[in-house]
Image (spheres, grey):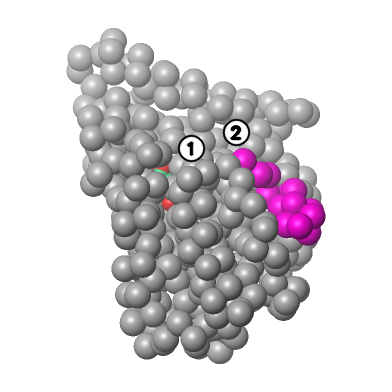
Amino acid sequence: MIVLGIESSCDDTAVGIYDSERGILSNVVSSQVDLHKEWGGVYPELAAREHTKNITAVLDLALKEAGLRLKDIDVVSSTVAPGLIVSLVIGSSAAKTISLSLKKPFIPVHHIEAHIYANFIYKEESYPFIALVVSGGHTELYLVEGFGNYRLLGKTLDDAVGEAYDKVARILNLGFPGGPVIDKISKKGQKTLHLPKPLSRKKEEHRFNFSFSGLKTAVLREVKNSKVCQIEDIACSFQETAVDILVEKTVDAVKEFNVKDVVVAGGVSANSRLRERLMEESKVHGFNVDFPPLSLCTDNGAMVAFAGYKRALKRPEGYPLTVETKARLPLEKFESFINSF
Ligand code: KG4
Ligand code: ZN
């Protein structure tokens, strides 16, 4: 089965092609990062305009790299939720148009499901597992008991961890996106600051919830008050604290639900320190931890094509083209949402 995947939920225009026999055939991402830099974050209207400009060129390139023609595609999938609504509409309208003209099934994909299953493009999954989802818009812990079977354990009550990285980078004048640069310069710094870890030792209702807004504000306070701190030390102190919070809650979830596997998903799964710390903890506590290959951590079309493939196995006839795009839609409600059309 050859599946086309279109991803346009935020600022990347991406098209990937997955073949169930040969794996990923192409994965083209057109990044808008330079355009959004001057805003210090993603500017929704600009993102939508760029998707419109780029989508056909990205699609052409993905087909060319895969050595395919449009008529060779068996299934067409796109991210329909969650994300910037106009951006989602552009990618999904393209996918629906292709599906209609080729008379091939349309498969709607949830962005977070695609991030999680990017771990399994080249590796068989085994259930149950804990998924730590860490991106620019999400910080969540799920207990996953099957494809489409997600139990939300906890989520951020304010900023996502990637958003905190981006905001701290802005405070430190490091540009956008903040994650990769903070990751890089932290290696040259020391953890010199004692920063707060909100909700870290909480039990019961907030046990698996996160909060990163106070951590970002604490960094801002330190930067304003201190004239002697090295930027590398501030970055390192922030990163160590953020990673500590993520690792502590993940290990707690592993113990609570007695699972043997953890997968990490989303843009922040590229973080070198998070990888290192979770690997260490996995040895201490006896679980396996998986991260997607670096090229599949941030937004891309191949992960959408693969999630589309997994869903097409469950429903080969596809879904009606009337399935809507949604700016907000919790992963655990996705299955019932798309089945309601
Ligand atoms: O998944 P993604 O590409 O887009 C969303 O769905 O949000 O994630 C983007 C986020 C950004 O906040 C970016 O700063 C962060 O992932 N990121 C990183 C790293 N690479 C990307 N954060 C920490 N360390 C990294 N190496
Ligand atoms: Zn993402």
The residue at 33%/42% (across/down) is 46
The amino acid at mark 1 is Val
User: Mark 1 and mark 2 in contact (Cβ < 8 Å)?
Assistant: yes
Q: Is residue 45 visible?
A: yes
Any atom of ligand 1 within 8 Å of the CB at mark 2?
no
Q: From the image, which quarter does the N terminus lie in?
A: bottom right
> Looking at the magenta stretch, what is its main secondary structure?
helix
The residue at the far front in this view is: 101
If you read the primary sequence from the N terminus, does the residue marked by circle 2 or circle 1 appear first? 2
Asked whether 46 or 121 is in front, the reply is 46
Q: Tell me if residue 231 comes above or below residue 110 in the rendering.
A: above
Q: Dot 1 surroundings within 10 Å: few (below 14), some, or many (20 or more)?
A: many
Task: Report the span colored magenta.
Answer: 328-341
Q: Is 162 drawn above or below residue 27 in the view shown?
A: above
Is residue 290 visible in this depiction of the protein? Answer: no
Q: State the CA–CA distance, disc 2 to disc 1.
A: 8 Å
Q: Counting other residues with Cα less than 10 Å from the Cα at mark 2, is it few (<14), some (14-19), or many (20 or more)?
A: many
**Residue, x 57% and y 24% (percent of image)?**
198
Position of 312 relative to 117 (above/below) = below
Find out whether residue 340 is within the magenta segment. Answer: yes
Mark carried by residue 156: 2
Which of the 4 quarters of the picture holds residue 314?
A: bottom right
Q: Residue 161 carries which label?
A: 1
Magenta-span inclusion, residue 337: yes
- Residue sitting nearer the eye, 286 or 130: 130
Residue 124 position, x and y percent, is: 64, 76
Q: In this view, does 314 lie to the left or right of 85?
A: right
> In x, y percent, where is residue 110?
61, 56
Residue at image coords 73%, 77%: 317
Apparent side of residue 260 relative to residue 158 in the rendered image (left or right): right
Quadrant hosting residue 288: bottom right
Distance from mark 1 CB to nearest ligand 1 atom below 8 Å: yes
